[in-house]
Image (cartoon, helix red, strand yellow):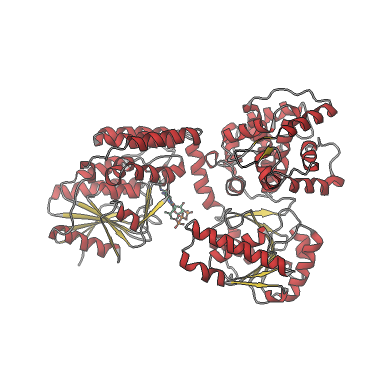
Amino acid sequence: MADIHQVNDLISIERQGDIALVCIDNPPVNATGQQVREGLQQAIEQLNAEGTAKVIAIYAAGRTFVAGADIREFGKPPKAPALPDVFNVIEDSAIPVISVMHGTALGGGFELGLSTHARIGIEGLRVGLPEINLGLLPGAGGTQRVPRLAGIPMALDMALSGRMVSAKAALEKGLIDRLESGDPRDVALKAAQDVLDGTLATRRTCDLDTPRDDKALEDTAAMLKKKQAHLFSPHKIVEAVRASYLPRAEGLKIERQAFVDSMDTPQRAGMIHAFFGERAVSGIPEAKGDTRPLDKIGVIGGGTMGSGIATSCLLAGIPVTLVEVAQDGLDRGVATITKNIDGAVSRGKLAADKRDAVLGMLTPSLEMEALSDVDLVIEAVFEQMDVKKDIFTKLDSICKDGAILASNTSYLDVNEIAACTGRPQDVLGLHFFSPAHVMRLLEIVQGEKTAADVLATGFALAKKLKKVGVLAQVCDGFIGNRILAHYSKTASYLVLDGASPQQVDDALEGFGFAMGPHKVGDLAGLDIGWMTRKRKAATRDPNERYAGDVADRICEEGWFGRKTGKGYYLYDGGAPVPNPEVAKIIDAVRAEKGITPRDFTDQEIVDRYMTAMIVEAARVVEDGTAKRPVDVDMVFLFGYGFPRFRGGPLHYADTIGAKELVSRIETYAKEDPHYWQVPPILRKMAEDGTKFADLN
Ligand code: 3HC
């Protein structure tokens, strides 16, 4: 009979002679919630009080060691014992304590390991300090113990990047002492015996001194001041790591204060919304249930989009048949895919020895008939309804029964496309974002007749491709592009009324966007928007203020942005500088329209732009195009470069409050009542005090 004693529901102690094995069993990821903290502390204190064990080994049950603090507790009143205190009890234990880590030891989980007197990794282990991705910093000794073991540059790198470090690298850096294979309990038992036999050394991490490296601290602080001035926790990380020169108690106090201060910021709330939102989008009933096979995929179109989609499938290990109409197009597609795969190798996303095998899963073809045996076809050709209809009519006669037919259209009516087949239940939209092998968003567009298992297969595909699948209903532009079409007009109106394109870009970059809208336009190609405006000219709403005057004239000059070396900015190799000719165009347009330019503060620019985004996002939720506000938020975080620390447009809206938003819209409406209208959902929220978060 094994001698096992439950300290509480989640922590147990197993005695094997002089050895005490402490097991953490808190599925799914063994997060250190209150009961885990309390149980661990009790276990160590109890064993020390009894004094019969000569070594203690901590391990975890299930798929992974501890994945960190319990994120669901953040933002709520803290419950004792605090994690750093528990880890001090472990580090101070008179009986040596070792840890055996498997899977992922992250944040508080890795910090638990650091507080033990020796660490054993199980093959496949990855360790990391990802708190920065939650707007936080390691708050249970990570900033104090990693520098002592692996030096300041490694501590800064891990805490500032949040990246996971392989077991091999962790061993090389001295973050773990051994790498073993086997079941965590068995490894723990053997390692504990090694401690007893004197073949595994133990020591307290905080007895070590951090090797001095003031230059690394200063250089990093200066870099962050320049590049991440708008973020809170990165700067605190440098402060806390610097404090690892101090004795443990003083260093931990500084780390704790920095952690508590970070916890109080809206950035932390935004990032945690992003963490749970990423998981919530696939938590809906439509994403669950039976799925169809995804063993072989067809992609039609070898342009940037089609090649990116094919790359993404190949990298996920799914064989792809790529179809193009002409040999040169097909060759270009294969070349682009090869380049993408080589890029994945050089970025470390794919092992070099797998490259040829991955490319070997690609079958290029000029015949649509080659798609007769695939499980899913993704059409990614020119955005023209008659071309798409022609393709889907052919697919209907070629593809096997049960095959899923998907269009990568970014705004066309999926129902109309489905209607030209005899199997509308098998048709859906799968809207990827360029570059499709990099961008994580996938809008899964439900047609009126799309079958439940087809929709669930769309979500299964997103998971296989490591993308964030978001359910959208049919409308012009679905969730993301529809909202974009609305708010991007604000940037143009601001320029017409007095701001410069650069001021608009600078203001929005200050808000947290990686690039302002004019820089994005230059990067994507200004001709794309120009073509859309021309196509929609006949159906333009005569009451709407036209937003395209300046951009049209820039395009008429043949300046399409980066690819022509000129757009809103000039690109001659160095940093982009504003194009002086554009300023003249703007002056001319203002003069023709009788506009007297006025000054805008950066804050007003941000307020107008964000309010316009929120207005259309609210409508998208109101009319059911998006199921919930969180779906809109994730579309923007994963497809549109929305700053993660702001959580998404509707999370951000909640931080402003519906009352203030309604008041802003009503003020702006005095100038342009057609564009600025209060969505009923927002007015209701302003009246009853509810938030978008209440609808998630
Ligand atoms: N707290 C609470 N819940 C957590 C959690 C955590 N730390 N980590 C994961 N979960 C939940 C997820 O929300 C999900 O719940 P659901 O099934 O209800 O949607 C479930 O556990 C499984 O998670 P994943 O779907 O993400 O599972 P994967 O196997 O894909 O990934 C993982 C596992 C790599 C561990 C990933 O979950 C992860 O990255 N977790 C977060 C790790 C992290 O950020 N840790 C630091 C926390 S902050 C901290 O420790 C502060 C300290 O310094 C004081």
Q: Residue at x 46, y 32 (%)?
A: 225
Q: Quadrant of the N terminus?
A: bottom left
Q: Is 691 left, or right, of 186 in this rendering?
A: right
Question: Against 614, is 281 above or below?
Answer: below
The image quarter in which residue 370 lies: bottom right
| Residue 451 in sight | no
Outermost residue toward the front in this view: 572
The image quarter in which residue 503 lies: top right
The image quarter in which residue 29 lies: bottom left
Numbered disc total: 0
Q: Is 257 left, or right, of 188 in this rendering?
A: right
Q: Is 676 left, or right, of 186 in this rendering?
A: right
Q: Position of residue 22 (x, y in %)?
A: 25, 55
| Residue 17 in sight | yes
Between 164 and 269, the one lying in front of the other is 164
Q: Position of residue 581 (x, y in %)?
A: 75, 33
Q: Residue at x 50, y 48 (%)?
A: 276
Question: Against 547, is 337 above or below?
Answer: below
Q: Position of residue 291 (x, y in %)?
A: 59, 68
Q: Position of residue 518 (x, y in %)?
A: 68, 39
